Image (tube, helix red, strand yellow):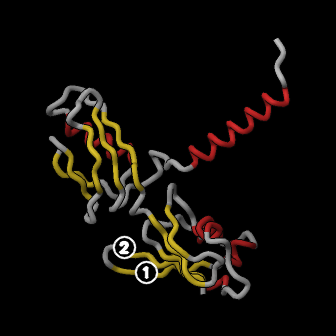
Amino acid sequence: MFINHGFTCAGILAFSLLSTSVWAEAPAADTYLIQPGDVLQISVWREEGLDKEVLVRPDGGLSFPLVGNVQASDRSIVQLQTEIGEKLKRFIPDPSVTVAIKELEGNNVYVIGKVARPGIFPMRSRLDVVQVLSMAGGMTPYAAANKVKILRRTGGRQTAIEFAYGDIEKGENLEQNILLSAGDVVVVP
């Protein structure tokens, strides 16, 4: 049997690149933390009435039949599946629960100031400061790279975290390149 080697290699390469880009868009079930505003698809195998699209409320909770209210925000998909499954065991023997994210509405970070593309950036996985600055196209030549601040609201209080990009460029003080949380604002003066 004759196979065109060039065509086969090109086809495999194209498929692998396409499949990588498609799967890269999906958040990892164990690293993505659910946020208020996210839309989830929750289903229980072999239970027709327990296949629901639910919105995570502003308080971080959601409601699901037989389970009632469940805290969803700041939890992974796997953690939420486990809790719903445990609560359903009172009604269904050995329930198989699936949680999928349909819309990422509540997991954004914001970049403002002297960057090429300021704006709102969805976090499909955990991102650090350098990654988000890269998504914003990098800093402009007039940016004060060593005076970047990350504004974070925790428990009703806002804090400012200093970030010196120049140190990162030199390979120093790398621990300041923190993972961002939903709602963080990166300010580049």
Q: Earlier in the sequence, mark 1 or mark 2?
A: 2
Residue 43's mark? none
Could you say whether the residue bearing mark 2 is in a helix, strand or loop? strand
Q: Residue furthest top?
A: 1
- Which amino acid, by three-letter code, is at mark 2? Thr
Q: Quadrant of the C terminus?
A: bottom right
- Residue 45 position within the rendered picture, expressed as x and y whole percent measured from the top left: 29, 29
CB-based contact (under 8 Å), mark 1 and mark 2: yes
Q: Residue at x 50, y 73 (%)?
A: 110
- Residue 48 position within the rendered picture, expressed as x and y whole percent measured from the top left: 23, 31
Q: Is residue 189 above or below residue 163?
A: below
Could you say whether the residue bearing mark 1 is in a helix, strand or loop? strand
- Residue 102 falls left or right of residue 52: right
- Which amino acid, by three-letter code, is at mark 1? Thr
The residues tagged by marks 1 and 2 sit, at their Cα atoms, a distance apart of 8 Å
Q: Residue at x 39, y 44 (%)?
A: 100
Residue 154's mark? 2
Label 1: few (<14), some or many (≥20) within 10 Å?
A: few
- Residue 124 position within the rendered picture, expressed as x and y whole percent measured from the top left: 50, 56
**Rendering quarter of residue 111:** bottom right
Q: Quadrant of the N terminus?
A: top right
- Residue 188 position within the rendered picture, expressed as x and y whole percent measured from the top left: 59, 82
| Viewer-side residue, 106 vs 52 | 52
Q: Is residue 125 above or below residue 111?
A: above
Q: Residue at x 43, y 66 (%)?
A: 182
Q: Residue at x 61, y 85 (%)?
A: 147
Residue assigned mark 1: 159
The answer to whether one can see residue 133 in this image is yes
The answer to whether one can see residue 74 in this image is no
